[in-house]
């Protein structure tokens, strides 16, 4: 696991670099897109690079998760968030960006179909991730099976309170259920790239990088991934025990070594 501690703008550039290198080498790559505020600067940076010539025309993308039961046109439905923040701003082909269907009549079937669709592409090449204050990735809340696949989950009160800011502050308007890629689904991606900024994420980041692997902090499963990059700002890094070592490692990183 590589930990990079840097200002948020630099983190966004590093993440965009990794995506640009991938798409340039293999235009048909499969990207994993995340919602939440953490990846927004990365998406802005990708849009700038798209305007400078980077193409997504042959790429495909899969979203991590979706609320259950939000109307199709609700602005906070993750499908609409991804469309607004990135998909509509670059040149993905129609139908190239997919998410789990939180309004399907048969939700279990929708989860199984989603797993099959990801597998049919050969799997996600680079998965962007944020982290919840309780250590969730996608919507894998504490207690999630470390071997889980896409399924229905119940959101914790903490996550609904954290996300209430997207619903005008009204926690009761935040859905109680979601469909989410499981931890094993996420672990199948070839490169995991997690972004976290702000002091509210400091404990979750400490557990993710330095805690024991446990379903209580689901993101800790990333310690088992052979290629995981954790990009954090000073505030999110403020509880890391080995912060000096991570800073030194990044400062001494050879020029030829990518994330
Ligand atoms: N399902 C999403 C996660 O994918 C995201 O990583 C997390 C953190 O969000 P933010 O980046 O806004 O802090 O919140 C949500 O619950």
Image: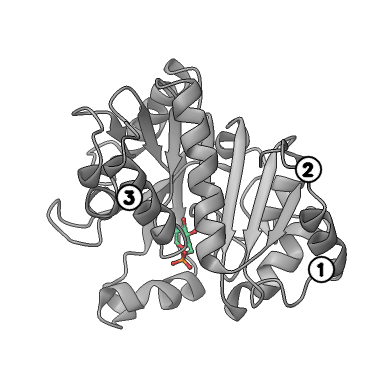
- The residue shown at (51%, 53%) is 13
Q: Quadrant location of the C terminus?
A: top right
Residue 143, horizontal then vertical, whole percent: 64, 57
**Taking the image as drawn, is residue 26 in sight?**
yes
Tell me the residue that label 2 is attached to.
Answer: 254
Residue 39, horizontal then vertical, whole percent: 44, 57
Front residue of 5/52: it is: 52
- Dot 1 or dot 3: first in sequence order is 3
Residue found farthest to the left: 73
Give the vertical position of 255 relative to 39 (above or below).
above
- The residue shown at (79%, 70%) is 240
Identify the mark at residue 42; answer none if there is no mark: none
Q: Is residue 126 left or right of residue 147?
A: left
Front residue of 53/28: it is: 53
Identify the mark at residue 243; answer none if there is no mark: 1
Decide if ligand 1 comes within 8 Å of the CB at mark 3: no
Which picture quadrant has residue 71? bottom left
Identify the mark at residue 48; answer none if there is no mark: 3
How far separated are the C-alphas under marks 1 and 3? 31 Å
Q: Residues within 10 Å of mark 3 (few under 14, many from 20)?
A: some
How far separated are the C-alphas under marks 1 and 2? 19 Å
Q: Are marks 3 and 2 in contact (CB under 8 Å)?
A: no
Secondary structure type for disc 3: helix
- The residue shown at (83%, 57%) is 212
- Dot 1 or dot 2: first in sequence order is 1
């Amino acid at each position: 696991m590589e930990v990079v501690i840097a200002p948020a703008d630099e983190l966004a550039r590093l993440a965009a670099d990794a995506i640009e290198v991938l798409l340039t080498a293999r235009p048909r790559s499969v990207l994993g897109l995340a919602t939440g505020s953490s990846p927004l600067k990365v998406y802005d940076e990708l849009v700038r690079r798209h305007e400078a010539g980077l193409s997504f025309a042959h790429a495909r993308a899969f979203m991590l998760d979706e609320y259950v039961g939000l109307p199709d046109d609700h602005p906070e439905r993750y499908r609409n968030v991804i469309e607004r923040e990135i998909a509509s701003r670059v040149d993905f082909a129609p139908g190239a960006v997919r998410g789990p269907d939180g309004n399907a009549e048969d939700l279990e079937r929708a989860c199984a179909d989603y797993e099959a669709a990801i597998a049919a592409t050969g799997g996600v090449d680079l998965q962007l991730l944020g982290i919840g204050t309780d250590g969730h990735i996608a919507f894998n809340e504490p207690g999630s099976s470390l071997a889980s696949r896409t399924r229905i989950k119940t959101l914790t009160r903490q996550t609904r309170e954290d996300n209430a800011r997207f619903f005008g502050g009204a926690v009761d308007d935040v859905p109680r259920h979601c469909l989410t890629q499981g931890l094993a689904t996420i672990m199948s991606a070839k490169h995991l790239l997690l972004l976290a900024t702000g002091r509210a994420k400091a404990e979750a980041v400490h557990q993710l990088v330095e805690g024991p692997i446990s379903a209580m902090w689901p993101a800790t499963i990333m310690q088992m991934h052979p290629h995981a990059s954790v990009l954090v700002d000073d505030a999110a890094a403020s509880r890391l025990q080995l912060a000096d070592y991570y800073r030194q490692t990044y400062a001494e990183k050879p020029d030829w070594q990518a994330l």
